[in-house]
Amino acid sequence: MRILFTNATILPCTPDMPVMEGAYLLVEGETILALGTGTPDVTADETLDLGGDILMPGMVNPHCHLAMTLFRGLGEDVDDRLFRYVLPMERKFVSPAMVRVGTALAALESIEAGVTTVADMYYYEAEVGRVLDRAGMRGIVGQTLADFNPPDHASMDEGFALVAALADEFAGHSRITASIAPHAPYSTGVPVMERIARWADDHQDVPVQIHLAEMTSENEWCATHHDMRPVQVVEAAGLLRPGLICAHCLHVTDDDIAAMADARVGVAHNARSNAKAGRGIAPVEAMRAAGIPVGIATDGPMSGNTLDLFAQFGPVSMFAKLLGKSRAPMPARDVIRMATIEGARVLGMDGSIGSLQPGKQADLIRIALDAPRMQPIYDHYATLVFSAMPSDVRDVMVAGRWLMRDRDVLTLERTQVMADAGQIATGFRAEMARIDAA
Amino acid sequence: MRILFTNATILPCTPDMPVMEGAYLLVEGETILALGTGTPDVTADETLDLGGDILMPGMVNPHCHLAMTLFRGLGEDVDDRLFRYVLPMERKFVSPAMVRVGTALAALESIEAGVTTVADMYYYEAEVGRVLDRAGMRGIVGQTLADFNPPDHASMDEGFALVAALADEFAGHSRITASIAPHAPYSTGVPVMERIARWADDHQDVPVQIHLAEMTSENEWCATHHDMRPVQVVEAAGLLRPGLICAHCLHVTDDDIAAMADARVGVAHNARSNAKAGRGIAPVEAMRAAGIPVGIATDGPMSGNTLDLFAQFGPVSMFAKLLGKSRAPMPARDVIRMATIEGARVLGMDGSIGSLQPGKQADLIRIALDAPRMQPIYDHYATLVFSAMPSDVRDVMVAGRWLMRDRDVLTLERTQVMADAGQIATGFRAEMARIDAA
């Protein structure tokens, strides 16, 4: 099966970040066979004239907690909401069924926003992997291991058993990758991190994810308990290693950045989540200058509210310009680079996704340009970063399979997913009322 | 003609910012006749069941340069773009026809985003007023007066003649209000500001707008030339007065804020525009604590890129939380308050618009809640601030007249407006290329 896109404005997201106008792209099966400008000398089973619309790689969200979509906006603006609402409610409500429903709602939203690959960290991750598989998305599903008696494992032996089962279930899967996720240096003790490091040594195909240097209180905890900074604690435990996916990294020093670059980790930048919590702005330009790949992430919708990268583009750009006191830092094309190929590099997937090149997986999205808000266009990257939004994404394809056509998600039952989510939210509302009345 | 909305979630934006579920609202002619919960005992010519959708006041954008929509994204990320591109291109291209086309594109975008009232500052403002009138919007149209030889007046006598003609043309108009707009303390000399103050004394119904304390270079200029801060220069010229619409106000001291509060000015906060320029964050919480009303503004699309307030909500909230190092500052309902009734107060229009109350003008918008991204809802204000976007606005009414129904703008010729804008943009592109080649 061959699909030919013609008359497209292709942003291949290759190193020079070119804009190819009047361009074509040919998909065969799961992969991209060819692309170029002018009239292609090829035959196809289906030809789609894009009328000048943008064709670009599906976006990569390198850090999220999909199932937490069910907590979206709960306890907004409340400083102690983690202990007041989140932890007690997670203990009470997190179950395989809740994770399944929350992930389905999240997948629906992600696909509608042109996000085709996610790295998730939560509980009952086999459910996450199954829903993402059914939705047709690409995902790294990370079983969280933590000391705070989390919902799905009472001991680390149980936690490791979950990881092993997850790795078994998705071994060899073309789109879903099992992952192991120590929660954070303050919540997953050094002995556990050391055990994870040994496990990861034996399972090189299982990526490791961690929350790192997210809060000043974390820095203080690490100083008190280990006389080290969070990055140093992770390094001492043997986890600061090539491919480690580090979420947040706000409170890092120049030495931390140098150590992270030496270790060849990747960073997931959660601009909106960090700012909404009043936690600060990650030194993204400094990390990238040191050679660390940085992707644009949403965090969980309890913290960042949405799962689209468009809502992150403004903050990512503005925060860099505010720190640099100039319009020049973080130009629009770098934002799009981070949302695609650089995010893929953070996940160790830049060999197969993140850019439109022959031989790569056909993970691509079409973005319409006909909204008044999108015109005129002097720089397609500026238009994407500052004008575009999820409603402009028209079509989404992963591995050559359509997940959305003309805004209609084909792989999930929208009505059922919304109804299931609504039912769970009703229970959450009652519990909130109970907590507030107590 | 009576229109009854039923089964709505009404956010009236009255002082307590309530959420009225299962509510109704009755419009008669141009005004709101009644609203409440439960089943209304009224008759209407048309009854609309909103199915739980939000009904709220049309949003107020208290500072923009609508015609500059044609410059959207031009010279993005370029620090010297003002002198490199904008000023030479304005000199070359700004004309009544260009202002007409740019304003029409801007009005289309504004209506699609649920913005019903704007305060504009630019050139050939009679054209702006005429387009907004035709579009059915409400607007304050400010003729800019500046010393830098702007496109539409070679002398201040010519400038004042434009203002007088503008005031004459829109005298008594129910939706369009003429305004006089000294550009800024560094670009409109004190003698001119004094002349404007005298003129405004004799024309109390003509609001005055000014850019104020926007840049550190402005503070330096005022220190060098007047040994004062910008707010003090404006005060010395007699312009710091009740109802003065002050745009930006980033670089203000506690003394400036006290003087502004005493003078009873209003502030238009341009969070995104200011941050994109790397200029900093306005002390919004401090100004509001001093009793100064602060509205949420977009600035011109050359600086802020879009004319919807949704794109500003995140920055407005996040910046306050970053400054306060906590989740608590600028709660979501305050953001919506600023976007509606407080913005109306900045423009001196809170007696007639900005909230849904019997006797007020029927300026209202319907927001759909059925996108996966909008669910679940625990706090409607949080949903509006962090999840909603222009594509969720379904219907727009101003003074009882439909401007948009089911996403179809009824008052402007979309295809023609887009074609006209595209033609002008082609000329801009050629000029940019000429400048870059020179």
Image (tube, coloured by chain):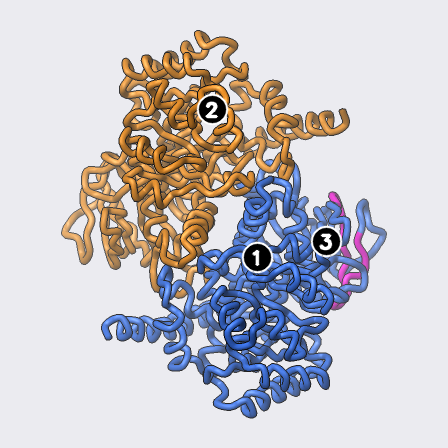
Chain colours: A orange, B blue
Let me know if residue B28 is in the magenta part.
Answer: yes
**Mark 2 residue type:** Cys
**Mark 3 residue type:** Cys
Mark 3 falls on what kind of element? loop
Q: Earlier in the sequence, mark 3 or mark 1?
A: 3
Please identify, in this view, whether the residue under mark 2 or under mark 1 is nearer the observer. Answer: 2
**A393 horizontally vs B111: left or right:** left
Snapshot quadrant of residue A276: top right
The image shows residue B70 at horizontal and vertical percentages of 43, 70
Mark 2 falls on what kind of element? helix
Please identify, in this view, whether the residue under mark 3 or under mark 1 is nearer the observer. Answer: 1
Which part of the image, by quadrant, shows the N terminus of chain A? top left
From where the camera sits, is residue B372 visible?
no
Which part of the image, by quadrant, shows the C terminus of chain A? top right
The image shows residue A317 at horizontal and vertical percentages of 42, 51
Establish whether labels 2 and 3 are both on one chain.
Answer: no
Chain under label 1? Answer: B
Magenta region's main secondary structure?
strand
Let me know if residue B183 is in the magenta part.
Answer: no
Establish whether labels 3 and 1 are both on one chain.
Answer: yes
Q: Residues within 10 Å of mark 1 (few under 14, many from 20)?
A: many
- Residue for point 33% across, 75% down: B427
Foreground residue among B88 and B74: B88
Dot 3 corresponds to which residue?
B13
Residue A222 numbered tag: 2
- Report the span colored magenta: B20-35
**Mark 1 residue type:** Ala
Q: Residues within 10 Å of mark 2 (few under 14, many from 20)?
A: many
Q: Is residue A246 above or below residue B100?
A: above
